[in-house]
Image (tube, helix red, strand yellow):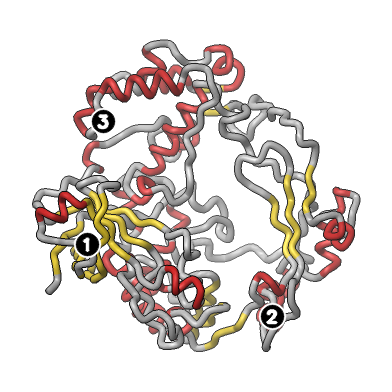
Amino acid sequence: NVVITEKRYNAAYVAANVSGFEELAASVINYTPEWAAGLSDVPAETIRRIAREFSGGCPALIPIHKREAIQSHPGGFELARACLSLMAITGQIERRGGIMLPRTGGLNWVGPAAQAPEMKVTERIDGGHLFPLAVKQPLVGPGLYQSVADMILADEPYPVKVAIVYGQSLQSMPNPQKWVQALSKLDYVININIYPDDMATVADLVLPEHVYLERYEISPRQTNARYMQIALAEPMIEPLYDTKDLGEIKHLIAQQLGLDQYLTPIGKAILDYRIAPSGMNFDTALANGGLITGSKEFVPKPLDKLNTESGKIQLSSPKLQEWGYSPVPFFDESWVLHPQNTDEFHLVTSRPPVHRHVKTHNMRWLNEIMPEGFIFINATRAAALGITDGDNIEVSTEFGAGQARAKLTQGIRPDTLCILHGFGQQSPFLQLVKKPGLNDGDIMPAWPKEKNIELKDPTGACLDCYMVVKVRKVG
């Protein structure tokens, strides 16, 4: 609103690279700094100052990560669109210090040996087919993991007999108790894993995978790269025990089903073929340092030949409008939850730098540094509740409850708690996890797909922090 009404946008950049500016400008008229100040605790003049600084001509960037706290609430998609729109109208896309399109060239694409037959049933067990921005084709897209358990239990849209789980722990899921119930209903559960976590304990068969130090990999940089960067990995040790690479595991399963011709080929020859545009084979590239790059000079990509209806950056989306959604970003005040009582808080989660998600808590040297998870609470609010540093506290919602020790700090909003993710593991095979802390999923909702439809969300995002939590001291 400030950038547009004060004409602080980059008019030449917008004219050359942007479509839908007029529609966006009309839509933000009522979103004034005073309106925003009434919903938040940020004064209107602070909002104006930041808007003017952001649009002052210097490089400016709003980092958008898949796991920002606001994207765990209604309107997360709209916030991401608003951030991108602000960067677009101020000319911050495809410039040094701004946001950049992916630069992942230099690799050959490898397809399957045979085209899979057309699917007779295209509805997905996660409901992803109902959300056009989540799933564009039946077998493409990350999907809606929060809906899977409900749909398995309801046999919707069809009964499921077998699950193959890779890269996900029960700690990855909101409401894991419901997941256990759903997985228990299946005839067979296969878990591909390197770690005897909670998911492994509910599987009928665990197929052990190589760890990353035992395998070859090609890893192109995806985000904000000024030039092409492709990193190669080689095994540092021979594989220990009876394990296999993920690609080989999938091929062996597919062979038993007579379907391996529909999978991407694997093997050393494929690695050579993928990096062939560099003029080297895999071994030569490793000998040259294992990093393939292009020219390091920053050359902006053209923004008038994009894969959109206009070929430009689109601030207003005809496709979303065609699907029945708002073509421009919007905000609905009903999305905002309001804790009412002194023991009620908003919730965010975080990943501690010591651990990687839920995969490292049983490593002795990392466990010694951080053996348990804490709940961060504002020191002033904690004092009002009679909570001191290190006290055991219970956090509860309508979906569940759990306990952990309180860590007092003034570095968090008074109305917000922060739970460290990855703790609360129950597997008996994890001998070092003696002070588990709270599994954040135990108190989170697994909102069904109908909630996203009600909120007019085209992405089907998991709204796992959309709740008010209660806190009380235990003991």
Count the labels in the image: 3
User: CB of mark 1 within 8 Å of CB of mark 3?
Assistant: no
Q: Return the mark for residue 204.
A: none
How many C-alpha atoms fall within 10 Å of the one at disc 3: few (<14), some, or many (≥20)?
Answer: few
Which residue is found at the position 77% from the left and 52% from the top?
A: 291
Which residue is found at the position 79% from the left and 41% from the top?
A: 294
Q: Residue 274 lies in what quarter of the image?
A: bottom right
- 437 relative position to 204: left or right: left
- 176 relative position to 144: left or right: left
Between residue 10 and residue 432, name the one nearer to us.
432
Residue type at tag 1 = Asp
Determine which residue is flagged by label 2.
244
Determine which residue is flagged by label 3.
42
For numbered disc 1, what is the local secondary structure?
A: loop
Determine which residue is flagged by label 1.
389
Between residue 258 and residue 295, name the one nearer to us.
295
- 60 relative position to 294: left or right: left
The picture places residue 446, in percent across and down from the top left corner, at: 32, 63
Which residue is found at the position 68% from the left and 36% from the top?
A: 226
Tell me which numbered mark, 1 or 3, is placed earlier along the sequence: 3
In the rendered image, which quarter contains the N terminus?
A: top left
Mark 1–mark 3 distance (CA, rounded to whole Å): 29 Å
Tell me which numbered mark, 2 or 1, is placed earlier along the sequence: 2
In the rendered image, which quarter contains the C terminus?
A: bottom left
User: CB of mark 2 within 8 Å of CB of mark 1?
Assistant: no
Residue type at tag 2 = Lys
- Residue 450 makes an appearance in the image: no
Between residue 51 and residue 66, name the one nearer to us.
51
- Residue 430 makes an appearance in the image: yes
